[in-house]
Amino acid sequence: MLVSASLVLLMTAPGLALFYGGMSRTKSVLNMLMMSFSALGVVGIVYALWGWSMSYSTTYGDTDGGSGKEIAKLFSDPFNQFGLEKTLPDNYVFVAFQLTFAVITAALISGAVADRLKFSAWLVFLPIWVTLSYFPLAHQVWGGGFLSGVEGGLADWLFSGPEGAEVAPIDYAGGTVVHINAGVAGLVLALLVGKRIGFGKEPFKPHNLTLTMIGAGLLWFGWFGFNVGSIVNLDAYTTETGLVWLNTTLATCAAMLGWLLVEKLRDGHATSLGAASGVVAGLVAITPACGNLVPWSSIVLGAVAGGVCALAVGLKYKLGYDDSLDVVGVHLVGGLIGTIGVGFLASNDGGLLTGGGPKQLVVQLVVALYAVVWSALATLVVGLAIKFTIGLRLEADDEVEGIDFVEHGESAYDLGTGGGARRASVLTP
């Protein structure tokens, strides 16, 4: 699991950083890299201080049965401190693993607001957003809260059984907590920040697709830590982890091909950007379902996700929202496809199309809707608070000049200017 945690850490930096950085314009690539790296720094610290407590304490938001005064004891005995059974050989292992999930969820949002969000606003947004949106959802889905199969939970309200929900929600590794959460947050934040100057009037082409392809490959590699590391059944881990690895791979392959097919039929070209985006769409869609499908159904889910997400990324032009790097089209839409799709395809007679009836599908639909509403409200509160205090957006002149130079005093490439960093002589009269 520590290896898996390290792989998930690799997904954020350099994986996601390169994926987003390559899709950005030359004058904003460093800022995109910095948004991913800063998410590591900020969310990592926040998770250790109170994120783990909020997500996995016995009494939500508190520690030690509700005292709320023992957060610092995380570093002495985190697993037992929060009233959880010691099912892993090392207390710190699970904390480390879950920390990396929180980090990449927050970092995913950055792609929706490329080129125009102030770096200071991003640094303020990160700790507040994970506190109000990510940690509560993680608790509700994975920490025995309202979106799990416990007695009194949402699924129990819908289909009550003798010991809790008759049909428990399925989210193996983060369809709701990670991808729907980040996708909705990206949409709300993009609407609050507003469109880039020139959106819809001039092309915003990726500046370096080589970086994007490398980033997609690193994301695919790291995703095995994301999915396979999320072991649910420790008694059958060998069979389960092998199945999860295979399902993750097959869904991603199918999604890439599905995206490329849509591109070829629609535009006449199968692009490298489409291949990279299809890979991510497949990974997103299989995340909640990877432990509850079989190989054939993983291929079906991946192909659907690739094709639908390829169409969904164009919605921003029709609906008029500026989701710079397609966080909504890939992560929100892909997360919904995976979360709802498992209700159709769950193995062992669990899904609507596999002999299990409609109950699992109904639960998945309601849970997905709940996650959308939760994330939207939390992000709206945080975004509005920042907008009316320190402000969210760069000045127009600064946006035109380029966020890299304005916010970081650097440029990604030395184009005969004497160096990538802003020199002291430039700042001195």
Image (cartoon, rainbow, N blue to C red):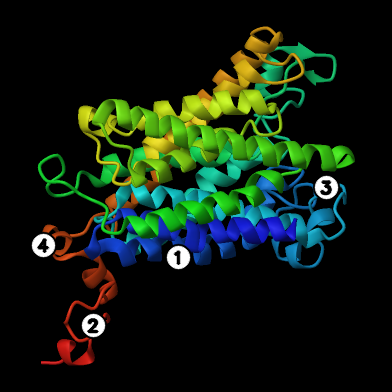
Tell me the residue that label 3 is attached to: 84
Q: CA distance from mark 3 to mark 4?
A: 53 Å
Q: Amino acid at mark 4?
A: Asp
Point 74% across, 36% down: residue:
243
Q: CA distance from mark 2 to mark 4?
A: 18 Å
**Mark 4 surroundings: few (<14), some (14-19) or many (≥20) residues within 10 A:** few
Q: Amino acid at mark 2?
A: Arg
Q: Amino acid at mark 3?
A: Leu
Q: CA distance from mark 2 to mark 1?
A: 20 Å
Q: CA distance from mark 1 to mark 4?
A: 25 Å
Question: In the structure shown, which secondary structural element does the residue marked by tag 4 occupy?
Answer: helix
User: Which numbered disc, 3 or 4, marks the residue that appears first in the sequence?
Assistant: 3
User: Which numbered disc, 1 or 3, marks the residue that appears first in the sequence?
Assistant: 1
Tell me the residue that label 4 is attached to: 397
Point 61% across, 28% down: residue:
298
User: Which numbered disc, 1 or 4, marks the residue that appears first in the sequence?
Assistant: 1
Point 58% across, 28% down: residue:
299
Q: Nearer the viewer, mark 2 or mark 4?
A: 2
Question: In the structure shown, which secondary structural element does the residue marked by tag 3 occupy?
Answer: loop
Quadrant containing the C terminus is bottom left
**Mark 3 surroundings: few (<14), some (14-19) or many (≥20) residues within 10 A:** some
Tell me the residue that label 2 is attached to: 422
Q: Nearer the viewer, mark 3 or mark 2?
A: 2
- Could you say which is closer to the camera, residue 50 or residue 318? 318
In percent of width and height, residue 212 lies at 38, 55
